[in-house]
């Protein structure tokens, strides 16, 4: 039985919000990989992207996700983690991977300033392009897919908790 849960999805899909709530309900730790990256590099995500470019950032992200060694944790990596095959193989080995699916219109409504959020966008790429590019990757790596409907994060947490408790028994 895998003792961790990894939440994947687009920026603003609720990985951190749902992750913290789920960790509290399960008595798990919560690991925000973006914060781990900032602690290990001593830089903000947007600074890493500005200094090393998008590909350099993705390499840093891939390496740090591959090195995660945690138990009984809810892991929330950045939305771009799915570009790192080795990172995703590691996360699938140590956790159940849950895709928090968000419809495009809702994503656009939630996001706000992409640069300030450290969203990994290639020059000339729109948010819609990014969404279309990542969707099949999220679907490929997911063990479980949940959509946040009108009930908000609490409903998703209840659903995931029930799934996790079933898989333990």
Image (cartoon, grey):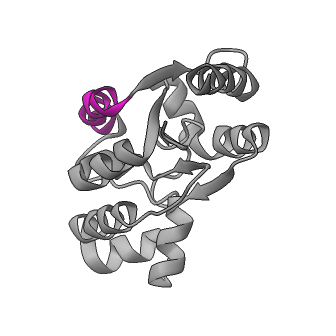
Q: Is residue 134 above or below residue 66?
A: above
Q: Answer with the quarter of the image where residue 97 lies.
A: top left
Q: Answer with the quarter of the image where residue 129 lies.
A: top left
Q: Report the label total.
A: 0
Magenta segment main secondary structure: helix
- Residue farthest to the top, as pictured: 150
Q: Residue at x 45, y 69 (%)?
A: 45
Q: Is residue 7 left or right of residue 154?
A: left
Front residue of this view, candidates 134 and 29: 29
Q: Is residue 126 above or below residue 71?
A: above
Please state the horizontal and vertical placement of residue 87, each as a whole percent of the image.
30, 55
Please state the horizontal and vertical placement of residue 163, each as a whole percent of the image.
60, 20
Q: Residue at x 24, y 71 (%)?
A: 56
Position of the C terminus, as image quadrant, is: top right
The answer to whether any part of residue 103 appears in the image is no
**Which region of the structure is painted magenta?**
129-142
Magenta span contains residue 139: yes
Q: Is residue 152 above or below residue 18?
A: above
């Amino acid at each position: 039985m895998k003792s961790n849960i990894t939440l994947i999805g687009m920026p603003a899909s609720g990985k951190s919000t749902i992750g913290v709530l789920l960790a509290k309900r399960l008595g798990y730790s919560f690991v925000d990989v973006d914060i781990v990256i900032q602690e290990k590099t001593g830089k903000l995500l947007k600074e890493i992207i500005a200094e090393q470019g998008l590909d350099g950032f993705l390499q840093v992200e891939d390496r740090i996700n591959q090195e995660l060694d945690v138990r009984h944790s809810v892991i929330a990596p950045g939305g771009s983690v799915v570009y790192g095959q080795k990172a995703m193989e590691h996360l699938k080995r140590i956790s159940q991977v849950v895709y928090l699916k968000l419809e495009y219109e809702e994503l656009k409504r939630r996001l706000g300033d992409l640069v300030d959020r450290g969203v990994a966008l290639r020059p000339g790429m729109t948010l819609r392009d990014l969404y279309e590019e990542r969707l099949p990757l999220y679907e490929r790596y997911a063990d479980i897919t949940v959509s946040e409907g009108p009930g908000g994060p609490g409903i998703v947490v209840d659903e995931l908790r029930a799934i996790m408790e079933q898989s333990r028994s």
